[in-house]
Image (spheres, rainbow, N blue to C red):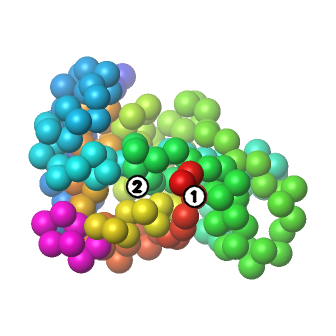
Amino acid sequence: AELTIPLVLGRMQKLVAQLGLKSSQFKEAPSDYYSWKLEQRRDLLKAPHIDHLCKTMLMVNSRKKEIDFSNPLNSKYYLAVFQYTSKMNKEKFMAVTRRLTGNSLSKKKFNWRVCSAEDNERLTGYGHNGVTCVGMKEHLPIVLSSRLLQFRDNGAADYMWLGAGHKDLKWRVSVDEFIRVLRPVVGDFVQD
């Protein structure tokens, strides 16, 4: 059964406080939020631009056999965080993750795909449109789109909006703080 928003919100507030993500704010969204245009979502969240709206997708390297969560430099799974206004480029994503291995692995060892809904929920603990980068069942490495660096040191606009553990809960966090605390790999993996 799906957890209620107050339960998920309480859990998220506790997690971000423990991590020291002090810039965090949360906002409940209506159940039809994902049918809205990006401009409507921006207005609800009071974001300065639609570029501040981000998604988190669990990616799986279907060519990697072993599952080792202890090595963030060569993981079978990565959370990809990027803007809704961008489209993922799997070749660029492969290049970013391959660089983590010092380019020691052949390109043939990589085939990035969006993780199945079942594996996504099993590994993150979150359902569709609720995936977030904290409080996951497994400690999964994060790859953050370098396009989000444009918001760093940008005063009140230094933040992004992400899912927050429930499809109807959104999380606002400073990009700079997100990088400092969660230590994602930052790379260019979206199409131009």
Q: Residue 102 lies in what quarter of the image?
A: bottom right
Q: Residue 78 lies in what quarter of the image?
A: bottom right
Q: Which stretch appears magenta?
A: 152-158
| Residue at mark 1 | 189
2 or 1: tag closer to the N-terminus: 2
Q: Nearer the viewer, residue 51 or 165?
A: 51
Q: How many marks?
A: 2
Relative to residue 119, is residue 103 drawn left or right?
A: right
Relative to residue 13, is residue 83 drawn left or right?
A: right
Q: Residue 6 lies in what quarter of the image?
A: top left
> Could you tell me if residue 11 is visible in this image?
no
97 above or below 169?
A: below
Q: Residue furthest front?
A: 192
> Could you tell me if residue 38 is visible in this image?
yes
Q: Nearer the viewer, residue 144 or 165?
A: 144
Q: Which mark is residue 133?
A: 2
